[in-house]
């Protein structure tokens, strides 16, 4: 099933599904359980959000996309995961058992992230949690598919019956997924880092190659003290170079290894 051309923010939202599954596969192959746990939590949240969009379109007989479910503007409040689960339950998208499991797994996710040092969490425990998340993922996949099928049957919403996907389509989908993992966009980088001067970040980051690795193995950006943004209107990132900010790294200065950080 394919969807009509969505708004740019929805494109970003949709490409995250493919990127997350790809990263999950890599995490599974490498045995990175904490990364897998975090990715699963994001993925099921994404499924609940897209289900809310699909359900609302069916109920209102529209193909408009409710932005509040798929994008959060900087500084604006948005629905957190638990609020999304609750809305999905209240609108009868998910049942009570799935709703309770989502909340239980999110409690575990928080315990792992915030209480790994101060609780009884063991790394090996996460394999069981990830397996439970995979079952939830499959259930939400089916729910999403059913909502898409209903949109097609009722000829309402953004879902349309698609023709066979061509090799060109597959290539474009792959490019979208790659862009969500690494787009080379300094503007996106600035947003992620909460930098206040986006235009200056774009200008200088492109020149200074902030993703080039240091000899310590961490990206140059981990050697930049971004307080320099508060001090100077016009600046050079090299003026803000400092010791590596990565936890546990003792590198006292940046020296390029010539390798780009992926």
Image: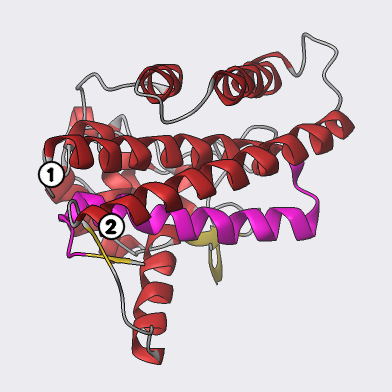
The residue depicted at 27 percent of the width and 64 percent of the height is 206
SS for callout 1: loop
Front-most of 31 and 238?
A: 31
- The question of residue 106 being in magenta is answered with no
Q: Which residue is mark 1?
A: 234
Q: Residue furthest bottom?
A: 167
Q: Which residues are magenta?
A: 4-33
181 or 196: which is nearer to us?
Answer: 181
**Numbered tag placed on residue 153 in the rendering:** 2
Q: For residue 214, which quarter of the picture?
A: bottom right
Percent x, y for residue 185?
28, 60
Residue 87, image x and y in percent?
36, 20
**Residue sitting at the far front:** 153
Q: Check the picture and name the quadrant holding the N terminus.
A: bottom left
Q: Main secondary structure of the magenta part?
A: helix
Mark 2 surroundings: few (<14), some (14-19) or many (≥20) residues within 10 A: few
Number of marks = 2
**Which of these two is toward me, 19 or 140?**
140
Say whether residue 106 is left or right of residue 162. right
Q: Is residue 244 above or below residue 153?
A: above
User: On the picture, is 173 further left or further right than 58?
Assistant: right
> Residue 186 appears at what percent x and percent y?
27, 56
Q: Which of the 4 image quadrants contains residue 61? A: top left
Going 18% across and 37% down the picture, which residue do you hit? 67
**Residue shown at the point (17%, 65%) measured from the top left:** 5
Is 136 left or right of 90, judged from the image as shown?
A: right
């Amino acid at each position: 099933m394919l969807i009509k051309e969505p708004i740019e923010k929805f494109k970003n939202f949709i490409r995250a599904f493919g990127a997350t599954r790809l990263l999950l596969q890599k995490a599974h192959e490498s045995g990175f359980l904490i990364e897998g746990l975090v990715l699963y939590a994001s993925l099921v949240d994404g499924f609940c959000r897209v289900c809310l969009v699909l359900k609302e379109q069916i109920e209102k007989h529209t193909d408009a996309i409710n932005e509040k479910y798929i994008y959060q503007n900087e500084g604006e409040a948005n629905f957190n995961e638990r609020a999304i689960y609750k809305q999905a339950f209240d609108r009868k998208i998910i049942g009570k058992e799935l709703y309770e499991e989502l909340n239980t797994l999110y409690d575990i996710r928080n315990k792992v992230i915030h209480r790994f040092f101060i609780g009884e969490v063991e790394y090996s425990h996460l394999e069981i949690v990830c397996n439970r998340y995979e079952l939830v993922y499959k259930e939400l996949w089916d729910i999403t598919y059913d909502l898409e099928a209903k949109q097609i049957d009722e000829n309402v919403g953004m879902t349309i019956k698609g023709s066979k996907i061509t090799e060109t389509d597959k290539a474009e989908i792959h490019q979208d997924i790659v862009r969500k993992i690494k787009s080379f966009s300094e503007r996106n980088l600035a947003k992620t880092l909460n930098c206040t001067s986006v235009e200056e970040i774009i200008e200088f980051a492109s020149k200074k190659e902030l993703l080039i690795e240091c000899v310590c193995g961490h990206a140059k950006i981990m050697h930049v003290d971004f307080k320099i943004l508060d001090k100077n209107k016009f600046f050079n990132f090299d003026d803000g170079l400092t010791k590596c900010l990565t936890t546990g790294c003792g590198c006292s200065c940046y020296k390029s290894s010539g390798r780009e950080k992926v």
